[in-house]
Amino acid sequence: MSTASPRSSAELDAADPLAPLRDRFVGAESDLVYFDGNSLGRPVADVADRLTTFVQEEWGGRLIRGWDERWMDLPTTLGDDLGRIALGAAAGQTAIGDSTTVWLYKLMRAAVDHAVRTDPARTEIVIDTDNFPTDRYVAEGIAAERGLTLRWIEVDTSAGVTADQVREAVSERTALVVVNHVAYRSAWLADAPELTRIVHEAGALVLWDLCHSAGVVPTALDAWDVDLAVGCTYKYLNGGPGSPAFGYVNARLQGELTQPIQGWMGHADPFLMGPGYTPAPGIRRFISGTPPILGMVAMQSMLELVDEAGIEAIREKSVALTSYAVELAEATLPEVTLASPRDPAQRGGHITLHHDRMREVTAALWQRDVIPDYRDPGGLRIGLSPLSTSFDEVERGIAAVAEALR
């Protein structure tokens, strides 16, 4: 354990260039300590006005005309904004709509079908045992549907997937590799460009789950030559409960993949209502049904805020917040172990602290308006959304953890 005295939260907040943006979030001024921004972000304050304006002027005023005037294109225009602001993706490769699970199914299924069609010997999906449950469940279902085999990478739940593990797992039988960019339990930050390169050398495709990195960890999907990516928008993108997910399909693959949920919104002419399905060009072919416009409207406020702050500055504060949480934990929680990478360059926007009684600690903290979440085994997960979290909040929260443990 470190013997150095923790730094002053007041000094850190005073020196934080992003501190003024905290006032833009509902509830940030309260005494509640929110350690779960990596599960559901606080609402941006102007969302209420934005939604009211939408209801009164677009929905109430324009009615069905809204589809022709803006809504039909919103999944791709907002997708382009997300790609530019947070993903490192050029226009025409990102679309918003559906849930994370549906996007995972569509892109995993499209990838393995393409791989098997190209080379029937590619019959394996590579995925790790600590991948987020939805990813594993979808992979299991697709493997059963298509007669494929799952090849599991066993990982340390306090770390994550390494280049050596991927190199050992892939082969001429690999169709698709599915990896979390930031591990949901430990916050391990995978080496996306290196792992992508290894998968490509094996002749396979890779799908990155960005749920715990979009909006908090910069990505460079185009520069890394990523094939496919999926992410949600209710964590660090603050779109609200159940806000729609996004999918990224590299432009070089869009004409090669056949998406399996052929809905009317992905048709080349949705209003033709013809007898057969003709896929739309580009990323639009990966849209299925009517997009959830209200969820997209709410997300626009946070995207604008991320654009204003800059994703690199957000990452810098994220590293500072998690490092401060580790520093405080080491100084005040001697009975607790860090179940996340110690090196901030190897972790995303949260940390996990381990103790056998953390489930009880979490329940006790919720009763006093300190809100972390719990992940087995014995993990208290602290998700620090950089634009809405102060260093003072971190200090008060760690002190509450120490008190609850006592």
Image (cartoon, rainbow, N blue to C red):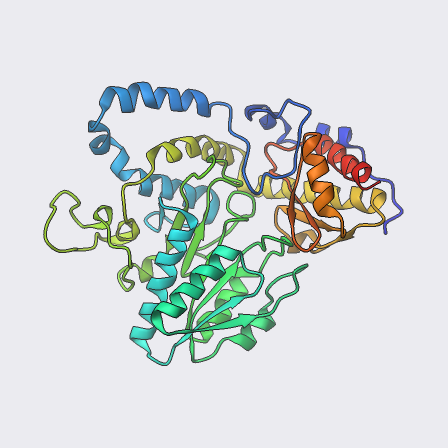
Q: Position of residue 355 (x, y in %)?
A: 76, 51
Q: Position of residue 369 (x, y in %)?
A: 68, 30
Q: Position of residue 56 (x, y in %)?
A: 31, 18
Q: Position of residue 316 (x, y in %)?
A: 63, 42
**Left/right of residue 11 with respect to residue 218 in the rendered view:** right
Q: Along the line of sight, which residue is nearer the eye, 203 or 336? A: 336
**Left/right of residue 33 with respect to residue 216 in the rendered view:** right
Q: Is residue 225 visible?
A: no
Q: Along the line of sight, which residue is nearer the eye, 251 or 113? A: 113
**Left/right of residue 12 with respect to residue 173 in the rendered view:** right
With respect to residue 54, does 257 lie above or below?
below
**Left/right of residue 173 with respect to residue 401 in the rendered view:** left
Q: Residue drawn 42% across and 42% down?
A: 82
With respect to residue 2, does 204 lie above or below?
below
Label total for image: 0
- Residue sitting at the far right: 3
Q: Residue drawn 68% across and 59% down?
A: 158
Q: Is residue 298 visible?
A: yes
Q: Residue drawn 84% across and 40% down?
A: 406
Q: Residue drawn 39% across and 35% down?
A: 295
